[in-house]
Structures are given as C-alpha cells and as structure tokens.
C-alpha cells in the first residue's frame, strides 16, 4: 500500500469536510476550508492510500513559523503511516517556506496524536488550561524546530 502526500484541490473539499466533521466537535465550515485552498499562507495537504482519500493536514503560516491547525486520518486507516506522512509533508513545506518552527495545540487526552508528534521530534512547550470546549479540556503545546540546534531530539523525517 502506497501513501501519497499532495496539495489539496477543490476536488478534495468534500472528503476533507466530511472527515473534519466526523473527527471534531466544532468543525470548520465548508467556506473556511475552501478559503484555505486559495490562501497562499496555508498548506492544506491530503494523503491518499493506493489512490483513495486517507486524510488531510492543514498548516497556516506566520512570518517565521507554521501552525499545524488540524490533521485527521480516516479511522480505519489510522496507525498505517498516513498521519506521519502528513506531518512530514507539512515539515517539508515549512522548510520550503523558510520557517524556523512548527507549533500546535493538542487535547491533553489525545494520546495517539501526542505519540505521533513526539515520534517525529515535536517537543512539549507548555499547556493552556481549558483551551478546548465541547468538551472542555486543556491543550498541550508542542513545537518542532526546523533549524538544527539542541532543542530537537532525533527527528524522524
């Protein structure tokens, strides 16, 4: 089975929106997701597995860093490498854009996502109390430093 990572197109919008709605208690609107397709500061990537939609990831850029805003993989395809491939695809885009780092927030209870992020070299940078709603939960903050220094352990890209 081959995982391919590519930029999302309008043809991917329905699949991205459907997965987003199934995975998140407060999903973005179709209009908001569509806007990311055309925003030059955003990277919306999709993963396909043997040609079929497997998941997506969205990173929005600032001057020197990217924020991994959202990532999801179809439930029956999780733990198959699509999530890792999406994170690595975003890291490649961040390098291409000249960013110093990628940062993100993750629900404190999302142990699978935390394990993925830590396995590719994200380091915990703090937490935000009661950041999420529906349900109310703390967020853990993670950074991935793209410039070689002592802040990253071994990176796995």
Image (cartoon, rainbow, N blue to C red):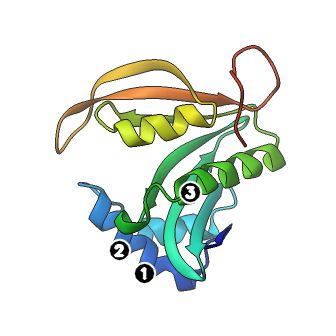
Image quadrant in which the N terminus is located: bottom right
Q: Can residue 69 be seen in this view?
A: yes
Q: Residue 143, relative to residue 69: is it above or below?
A: above
| Callout 2–callout 1 Cβ contact below 8 Å | yes
Residues at discs 3 and 2 in contact (Cβ within 8 Å): no
**For this view, does 13 lie left or right of residue 144?**
left
- Residue 144 in the image: above or below residue 95: above
Task: Give neighbour class at mark 2: few <14, some 14-19, many 20+ (Cα, 10 Å).
Answer: few
Task: Where is residue 99? Give x, y as percent.
Answer: 76, 38
Point out the tag, 3 or 1, that comes first from the N-terminus: 1
N-terminal-most mark, 3 or 2:
2
The Cα atoms of the two marked residues, 3 and 1, are separated by 22 Å
Secondary structure of the residue carrying numbered label 3:
loop
Horizontal arrangement in the rendering, residue 15 relative to residue 45 (left or right): left
Q: What is the secondary structure assignment of the residue under circle 2?
A: helix
Q: Which residue is drawn at 73% across and 43% down?
A: 157
User: Which residue extends farthest top?
Assistant: 150
Residue at 55%, 60% in the rendered image: 82
Residue 29 in sight: no
Q: Residue 14 carries which label?
A: 1
What label sits on residue 81 in the rendered view? Answer: 3
Among the 4 quarters of the image, the one containing residue 50: bottom right
Which of discs 3 and 2 lies nearer the camera? The answer is: 3
Residue 118, percent across and down?
54, 31
Find the distance from the CA under tag 3 to the CA under tag 2: 21 Å
Residue depicted at x 60% and y 83%: 51
x and y percent of residue 105 in the render? 44, 35
Give the SS element for disc 1.
Answer: helix
**Residue drawn at x 46%, y 54% as measured from the top left:** 79
């Amino acid at each position: 089975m081959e995982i391919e990572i590519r930029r999302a197109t309008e043809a991917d919008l329905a699949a991205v929106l459907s997965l987003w709605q199934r995975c998140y208690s407060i999903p973005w609107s179709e209009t908001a997701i569509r806007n990311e397709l055309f925003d030059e500061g955003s990277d919306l990537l999709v993963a396909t597995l043997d040609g079929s939609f497997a998941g997506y990831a969205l990173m929005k850029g600032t001057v020197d860093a990217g924020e991994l805003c959202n990532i999801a993989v179809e439930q029956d395809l999780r733990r198959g490498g699509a999530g890792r491939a999406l994170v690595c695809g975003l890291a490649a885009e961040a390098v291409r854009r000249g960013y110093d780092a990628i940062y993100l927030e993750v629900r404190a209870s999302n142990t699978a996502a935390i394990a993925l992020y830590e396995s590719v070299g994200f380091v915990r940078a703090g937490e935000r109390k009661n950041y999420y709603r529906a349900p109310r939960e703390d967020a853990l903050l993670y950074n991935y430093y793209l410039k070689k220094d002592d802040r990253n352990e071994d990176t796995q890209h």
